[in-house]
Image (cartoon, rainbow, N blue to C red):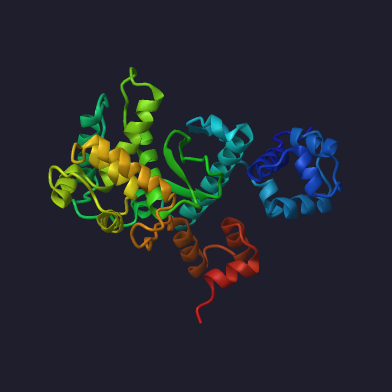
């Protein structure tokens, strides 16, 4: 029995990151390693020969060094909201990917001595109703010096304030997650395939789960609705809505919704609901406009759809570490989860 079983824990984590069962890994390996052997490796009852480690590394897209590096982050240190629609296997995959990404992120931060601290905003808030949501969104604009003009990239804003953001390829029913690693590192996960406007709303929705304190009498559905309302209120505060549209409207054209969408980076659907919640738009017309927006699932015919908003701090740290010679290319490739040629084409092509 291996005393600390580092290899076994690493193998288990890498398998879960890949979304594979032990049977699935055996199939991927074309039966060259048995399920019994994999189970014994993971339990620490035996260690594989070097050629088998290489097979596992290739199959799971990891370096051989990965399997022998002491664990610094484990899923037991990650708390995130349950999503029953995803199923246990998908939840485990996401948890392990968060752990792995956090570990790689922290390695880079330590190499460059550029750790970001999360100073929790909105201390002492208590959410009981929609008015509390509006006040917290306005206070966040003040706390983070956001002003009341259209927000720039939301993902960068979150990362600048100590919140790590990860985009994952996930199923349609994935709505985003927020997590706390080791009770001090906040993490937000969004669906990579969503539109920029949807990812912005989702990221700020998850910020709501991280920083808002909800009255215990509120049920889960109301909490979710309030987090979405908070996200929309951060993207376009109520004073800005009134400035843009007036206090009362009977309707919005597709053209005007597109202009607002492009200007503030909020989907037409989210803005329609916001206008209804603020009493700017009558509820019957809001319902009709919601139906119109939902017919165009990705809002391809509303606005220019030219906005780009992705988390990029990890890539910036990695580029800096490579440029300054703080990390070998082999190690950089492992951190980036790229093969060496792809890494060099991405980070070293200065021609």
Question: In front here: 171 or 214?
Answer: 171
Seen as rendered, the residue at the extreme bottom is: 351
Residue 117 in view in this figure: no
Q: Residue at coordinates 56% horizontally, 44% vertically from top-left? A: 171
Left or right position of 176 against 283: right
Instruction: Give percent across and percent down for residue 51.
Output: 83, 53
Quadrant location of the N terminus?
Answer: top right
- Compared across the picture, whether 141 is left or right of 107 comes to left
Tally the marks: 0
Q: Measured from the top left, where is residue 292 in percent x and y?
A: 36, 47
Quadrant of the rendered image containing residue 156: bottom left
Work out whether residue 311 or residue 199 is closer to the camera in this orientation and state it.
199
Of 63 and 157, the residue lying toward us: 157
Residue at the top extreme, as displayed: 217
Q: Residue at x 76, y 49 (%)?
A: 56
Name the residue located 40 percent from the left edge and 48 percent from the top edge.
Answer: 198
Place of residue 66 in the rendered image (x, y in percent of width and height, measured from the top left)? 66, 50
Image position, residue 19 (x, y; %)? 66, 42
Relative placement, left or right, of 40 versus 110 is right
Front in this rendered view, residue 123 or 271: 271
Vertical comparison of 6 with 169: above or below: above
Q: Is residue 86 visible?
A: yes
């Amino acid at each position: 029995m291996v005393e600390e079983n580092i290899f076994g824990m690493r193998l288990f984590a890498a398998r879960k990151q890949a979304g594979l069962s032990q049977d699935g890994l055996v199939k991927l390996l074309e039966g060259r390693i048995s399920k019994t052997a994999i189970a014994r490796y993971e339990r620490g009852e035996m260690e594989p020969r070097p050629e088998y480690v290489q097979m596992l590394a290739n199959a799971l897209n990891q370096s051989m060094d990965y399997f022998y590096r002491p664990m610094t982050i484990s899923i037991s240190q990650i708390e995130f909201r349950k999503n029953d629609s995803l199923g246990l296997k998908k939840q485990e995959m996401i948890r392990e990917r968060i752990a792995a990404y956090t570990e790689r992120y922290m390695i880079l931060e330590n190499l460059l001595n550029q750790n970001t601290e999360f100073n929790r905003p909105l201390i002492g808030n208590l959410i009981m109703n929609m008015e509390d949501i509006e006040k917290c969104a306005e206070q966040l604009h003040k706390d983070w010096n956001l002003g009341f003009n259209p927000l720039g990239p939301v993902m960068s804003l979150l990362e600048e304030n100590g919140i790590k953001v990860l985009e994952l390829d996930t199923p349609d029913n994935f709505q985003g997650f927020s997590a706390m690693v080791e009770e001090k590192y906040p993490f937000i996960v969004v669906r990579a395939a969503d539109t920029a406007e949807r990812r912005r709303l989702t990221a700020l929705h998850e910020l709501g789960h991280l920083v808002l304190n909800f009255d215990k009498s509120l049920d889960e559905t109301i909490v979710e609705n309030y987090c979405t309302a908070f996200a929309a209120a951060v993207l376009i505060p109520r004073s800005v809505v009134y400035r843009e549209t007036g206090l009362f409207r009977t309707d919005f054209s597709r053209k005007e919704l597109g202009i607002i969408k492009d200007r503030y980076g909020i989907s037409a659907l989210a803005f329609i609901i916001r206008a209804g919640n603020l009493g700017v738009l009558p509820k019957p017309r809001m319902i009709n406009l919601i139906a119109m927006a939902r017919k165009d699932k990705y809002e391809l015919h509303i606005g220019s759809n030219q906005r780009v908003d992705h988390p990029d701090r990890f890539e910036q740290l990695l580029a800096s570490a490579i440029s300054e010679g703080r990390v070998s290319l082999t190690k950089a490739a492992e951190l980036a989860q790229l093969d060496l040629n792809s890494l060099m084409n991405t980070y070293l092509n200065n021609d």
